[in-house]
Amino acid sequence: GDSVTQMEGPVTLSEEAFLTINCTYTATGYPSLFWYVQYPGEGLQLLLKATKADDKGSNKGFEATYRKETTSFHLEKGSVQVSDSAVYFCALSGGGGNKLTFGTGTQLKVEL
Amino acid sequence: DAMVIQNPRYQVTQFGKPVTLSCSQTLNHNVMYWYQQKSSQAPKLLFHYYDKDFNNEADTPDNFQSRRPNTSFCFLDIRSPGLGDAAMYLCATSKEGANPYTDTQYFGPGTRLTVL
């Protein structure tokens, strides 16, 4: 079945550092790929998405490129802020219509 | 603002005592989902409604039921909660387009269920 693997956290960075959170996937067909963010005590919010190979999703300074050849969708940001502290989930849609399969999440802590 | 609302945000129940969680949406989306998220784990889909059509995941326990009386509301019923059912329950919605694989799901804030 479909699956998503994310790097384990927590990831602790200093403010203005470069961020990479790795995500790889296994899926049949042509899934869409998503990054969701969950702030403390809140639900999941869509951060960005890409629906086909080589697409780049971007939002709020975050970017991720759909790499079919490496089955990856790594999240990057050039300069993180304390307000980016949250849990980030990589997910794919493809296992039976609109079902989302999530990774286990990566907690990001940004310190001053 | 259009949104997904979940009530209550925190629910405490006793072992074996039925509990109902509520979700409503003002997005007029035709698909609604219930996910279970245990501590430090990924959200796991329990079931979803496509309009009135109910779709159960194969590994969702019979203890979990759902109702969708109209487009706006969806309920999650746990008939006999066990200690292992303590989790965050997330409701989500989407509007199915031509390609459902590309649809974005919009999540509510979740209901945290504690079972004593």
Image (cartoon, coloured by chain):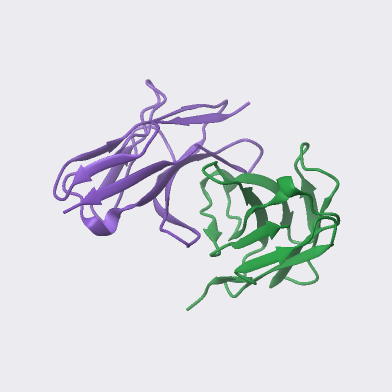
Residue A90 in percent (x, y) is at: 44, 40
The number of callouts visible is: 0
Q: Residue furthest front?
A: B116
| Residue A77 in sight | no
Residue B45 in percent (x, y) is at: 66, 46
Q: Residue furthest left?
A: A16
- Visual hue assigned to chain A: purple
Q: Is residue A53 above or below residue B14?
A: above
Residue A37 in percent (x, y) is at: 41, 52
Position of residue B100 in the picture relative to residue B75 (left or right): left
Q: Quadrant of residue A75?
A: top left
Q: Residue furthest top?
A: A69
| Residue B106 in sight | yes
Residue B106 in percent (x, y) is at: 53, 60
Position of residue B112 in the picture relative to residue A20 (left or right): right
In the picture, which quadrant includes the C terminus of chain B?
A: bottom right
Instruction: Give me the residue at 53% from left, 51% from top.
Output: B103
Task: Between residue B11 and residue A59, name the one nearer to us.
Answer: B11
Instruction: Give me the residue at 37% from left, 21% from top.
Output: A70
Q: Quadrant of residue A45?
A: bottom left
Task: Between residue A12 and residue B103, name the one nearer to us.
Answer: A12
In the picture, which chain is green?
B
Q: Is residue A86 above or below residue A51?
A: below
Instruction: Give me the residue at 78% from left, 49% from top.
Output: B82
Position of residue A15 in the picture relative to residue B23 (left or right): left
